[in-house]
Image (spheres, rainbow, N blue to C red):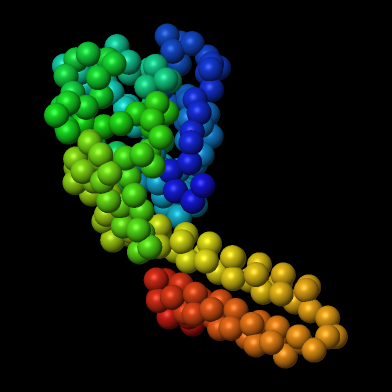
Amino acid sequence: MTFFPTIVRRSQYIGEPKVYTYRRYKSEIAEDCAHRCVYCDCHCNSLGGHVLMELDHFRPKSVPHFPELENEPKNLVLACRSCNGRKRDDWPAGKAKETTHVDGLGYIDPFETQRLLYFNVDERGTLAAKKDPAAYMIEQLSLNRPFAVAIRARRLLRGKLHAAIDRLADELRAMDDSAHQAGQLRQIADLLQEANQALRDLEMEDGPAL
Ligand SMILES: [Zn+2]
């Protein structure tokens, strides 16, 4: 899945929350979150690696929210600094643990929901809201900040490039000495042109090649 893959929480984290602080769980949480920020969907490799990723308390640990969940691993999700910094202690859903959004305000639990039911990603990498509270999340966490959009666009372009090259390889394998060869060569040329255009688009996203 290109964006917002299904993520599954392991049934048990090693170590008792009473003994360990929440930072102990970072590597397991990162694995469970497929090494992506659960909000903007950027992969940690695009953001400078795990060292620059943070643990977000999905239900905020601050008073008066859920201080009792400070070291509870099942309340932790992987988030980039930008998203975590914007989310902070924001929690408009009230004190009930099972409620994560109210009247369009709040957040969806990435482990409890299929995020693609809430978000659409267009060809340019821009997120659009499909249903509440996605619009609130996009606004509150600035999920369409240019850097995140560019990372999603590059992922899309890489996918297009791979697909074009795969098709080219298939065409080449199917070539034989028959009279169809000329037509097949034209198709290969078209595919090469498509791959080249995708590369040019990619270079525009990253800046000119040196
Ligand atoms: Zn993020």
Residue 97 location in percent, x, y? 27, 15
Nearest the viewer among 208 and 196 is 196
Residue 54 location in percent, x, y? 38, 37
Q: How many marks?
A: 0
In the rendered image of this protein, does residue 55 appear above or below residue 156?
above
Residue 61 location in percent, x, y? 26, 21
Nearest the viewer among 141 and 52 is 141
Dividing the picture into quadrants, the one containing residue 135 is top left
Given the current orientation, which residue lies at the most extreme front position?
179
Dividing the picture into quadrants, the one containing residue 148 is bottom left
| Residue at figure coordinates x 28%, y 61% from the top left | 146
Nearest the viewer among 25 and 195 is 195
| Residue at figure coordinates x 47%, y 66% from the top left | 157
In the rendered image of this protein, does residue 85 appear above or below residue 96?
below
Whether residue 192 is visible to the viewer of this picture, yes or no, is: no
| Residue at figure coordinates x 27%, y 54% from the top left | 144
In the rendered image of this protein, does residue 156 appear above or below residue 115?
below
Whether residue 100 is visible to the viewer of this picture, yes or no, is: yes
Dividing the picture into quadrants, the one containing residue 57 is top left
Nearest the viewer among 132 and 81 is 132
Residue 79 location in percent, x, y? 37, 39
In-image side of 62 versus 17 (left or right):
left
| Residue at figure coordinates x 53%, y 16% from the top left | 12
